[in-house]
Image (tube, rainbow, N blue to C red):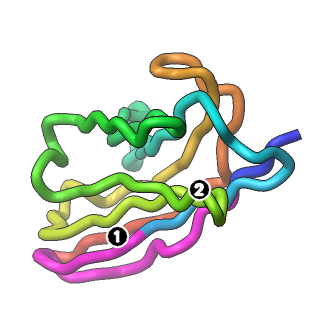
């Protein structure tokens, strides 16, 4: 069974930066996709970024392109989301997910809150 644990969320002012981490245990990834999603209060969950584990090929939502960077450390079985120039509309609970992708994800983390103040 795969477990995903997010960390790195918090409160930051607009224009600031945060780096989220997603540590995977229970399986060493060699293929498949890992991704970040977010859900703001009262809104549906939305895709943020994904990464193909074997090639590190990435994809981003238009709303975060140029500001967020997804990456992974294969040795640590960990995925990251570097978030720069944060905006109040980035406020949400951020979830990491893993699976065959790009649409199907079998495993989800518990989420980490990111709050951006104006």
> Which residue is the site of mark 1?
115
Q: Where 101 sits versus 70, above or below?
A: above
Percent position of residue 27, x then y: 81, 45
Q: Position of residue 88 (x, y in %)?
A: 18, 64
Question: Mark 2 highlights which residue?
Answer: 74
Q: Residue furthest top?
A: 103
At mark 2, the secondary structure is loop
Q: Tell me the residue at 38%/60% (across/down).
A: 81
Q: Is residue 3 left or right of residue 86?
A: right
- Quadrant in which the C terminus appears: bottom left
Q: Residues within 10 Å of mark 1 (few under 14, many from 20)?
A: many
Whether residue 10 appears in magenta in the rendering, the answer is: yes
Q: Which residues are magenta?
A: 5-19
What is the spatial separation of the Cα atoms under label 2 and label 1, in whole angstroms?
29 Å
Q: Position of residue 64 (x, y in %)?
A: 18, 48
Between residue 78 and residue 92, name the one nearer to us.
78
84 w.r.t. 11: above or below: above
Give whichever of 11, 71 is nearer the camera. Answer: 71
Q: Secondary structure at mark 1?
A: strand
Task: Give the residue at x 78% y 50%.
Answer: 3
> Which quarter of the figure has residue 30?
top right
In the visual, does 5 lie left or right of 96?
Answer: right
Quadrant of image for the N terminus:
top right
- Residue depicted at x 70% and y 35%: 107
Q: Is residue 37 left or right of residue 21?
A: left
Q: Is residue 44 magenta?
A: no
- Residue 93, image x and y in percent? 47, 55
């Amino acid at each position: 069974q795969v477990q995903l644990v997010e960390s790195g969320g918090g409160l930051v002012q607009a224009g600031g930066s945060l780096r989220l981490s997603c540590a995977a245990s229970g399986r060493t990834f060699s293929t498949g996709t890992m991704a970040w999603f977010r859900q703001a209060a009262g809104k549906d969950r939305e895709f943020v970024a994904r990464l193909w584990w074997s090639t590190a090929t990435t994809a981003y939502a238009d709303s975060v392109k140029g500001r967020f960077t997804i990456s992974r450390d294969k040795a640590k079985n960990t995925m990251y989301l570097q978030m720069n120039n944060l905006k109040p509309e980035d406020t949400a609970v951020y979830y990491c997910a893993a699976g065959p992708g790009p649409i199907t994800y079998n495993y989800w983390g518990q989420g980490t809150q990111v709050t951006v103040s104006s």
